[in-house]
């Protein structure tokens, strides 16, 4: 074979390799584009799933760290219930679109506060919220109870700003909520069927927390003695009497949450002055529109301390 033939053959082989190489490049680009498109779809599905799950549960499912079959365990949790006082009375008099917007704004703010303190949002039931601390991730009982009560205080203090948003939207409703908190052993895990499961909790302490919420007054945070015993050194409370809960053999001792002890003690209250003979309660001027949450809290604390001193 002469040199010209050899050269021609090599050129033919090179051309074949060139075509093969280009085919590989095209195929690789196609696969890469397909992977990118699939990743976008997966991220879209994950983002949608994130909206339906608490952050803790989402992270565990997305990271394959949680059991996805029907399973549960006993664990000591702190359980929170809240609802808006008188919400059902305004549902018939307000346009559904306006009411939905204001309710979603309320739930959005409450959810952000719950996430801030590490609470697992179990469910929304209309205007009612159920949250628990201690699962799926666990720290310790005292931290869970304290974070839950701190969360409740911040939720309570955020209501005046939300009430202003409601008023501007056309809902002239005194926005207040009732809150109940209890600590106890419950069953937590996946309940349902293999096709449809809920990660939730069941047990007597859940019923007690719900009953505490029902028994609390407007704007009040009511906790059980089981919760109070864990947070007593940090939270200022006062006894509120006993309640009877169906299925519980003994009455439940309840306490009203006033505020954080250290925060109240380190601040000089401008409305209340104590001396050796007693106290001086200065005139209070309260206006729903202009009085900010901090002033409201100081006023409430001054009145609570003055009443306690009188007793």
Image: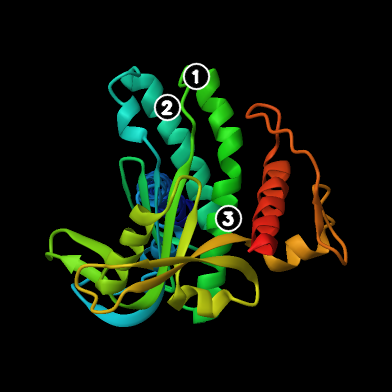
Q: Which residue is mark 3?
A: 153
User: Which circle's residue, 3 or 1, is located before the other in the chain?
Assistant: 3
Q: Is residue 206 above or below residue 73?
A: above
Can you tell which quarter of the image residue 205 is in? Answer: bottom left
Quarter in which the N terminus is drawn:
bottom left
Residue 230: x, y in percent?
Answer: 53, 79
Q: Which residue is mark 1?
A: 169
Q: Which residue is mark 2?
A: 101
Quarter in which the C terminus is drawn:
bottom right
Can you tell which quarter of the image residue 208 is in? Answer: bottom left
Q: Is residue 228 left or right of residue 46?
A: right
**How many angstroms separate mark 2 from mark 1 (CA)?**
9 Å
Instruction: Estimate how packed mark 3 is, as few (under 14), some (14 to 19) or many (20 or more) residues with alpha carbons within 10 Å.
Output: some
Look at the numbered disc 2 and give the secondary structure of its residue: helix
Can you tell which quarter of the image residue 161 is in? Answer: top right
Judge depth for marks 3 and 2 and give the one in front. Answer: 3
**How many angstroms separate mark 3 from mark 2 (CA)?**
24 Å
Q: Is residue 127 left or right of residue 285?
A: left
> Is residue 204 in view from this perspective?
yes
Q: Is residue 263 left or right of residue 73?
A: right
Look at the numbered disc 3 and give the secondary structure of its residue: helix
Tag 2 and tag 1, C-beta contact below 8 Å? yes
Q: Is residue 178 above or below residue 277?
A: above
């Amino acid at each position: 074979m002469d040199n010209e033939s050899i050269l021609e053959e090599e050129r033919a082989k090179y051309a074949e390799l060139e075509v093969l190489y280009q085919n590989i490049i095209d195929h690789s680009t196609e696969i890469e584009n397909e992977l990118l498109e699939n990743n976008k779809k997966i991220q879209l599905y994950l983002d949608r799933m994130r909206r339906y799950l608490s952050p803790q549960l989402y992270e565990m499912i997305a990271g394959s760290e949680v059991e996805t079959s029907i399973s549960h365990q006993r664990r000591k949790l702190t359980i929170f219930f809240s609802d808006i006082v008188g919400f059902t009375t305004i549902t018939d008099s307000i346009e559904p679109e306006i009411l939905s917007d204001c309710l979603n704004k309320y739930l959005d703010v409450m959810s952000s506060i719950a996430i801030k303190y590490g609470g697992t949002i179990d469910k929304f039931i209309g205007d009612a919220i159920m949250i628990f601390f201690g699962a799926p991730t666990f720290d310790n009982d005292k931290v869970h109870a304290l974070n839950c009560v701190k969360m409740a205080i911040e939720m309570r203090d955020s209501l005046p700003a939300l009430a202003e948003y409601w008023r501007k939207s056309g809902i002239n409703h005194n926005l207040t909520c009732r809150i109940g908190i209890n600590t106890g052993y419950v069953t937590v895990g996946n309940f349902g069927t293999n096709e449809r499961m809920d990660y939730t909790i069941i047990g007597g302490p859940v019923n007690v927390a719900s009953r505490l919420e029902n028994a609390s007054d407007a704007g009040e945070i009511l906790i059980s003695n089981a919760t109070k015993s864990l947070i007593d050194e940090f939270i200022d409370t006062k006894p509120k009497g006993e309640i009877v809960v169906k299925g519980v053999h003994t009455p439940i001792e309840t306490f009203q949450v006033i505020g954080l002890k250290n925060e109240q003690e380190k601040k000089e209250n401008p409305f209340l002055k104590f001396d050796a003979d007693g106290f001086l309660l200065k005139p209070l001027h309260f206006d729903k529109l202009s009085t900010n949450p901090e002033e409201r809290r100081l006023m409430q604390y001054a009145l609570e301390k003055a009443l306690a001193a009188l007793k």
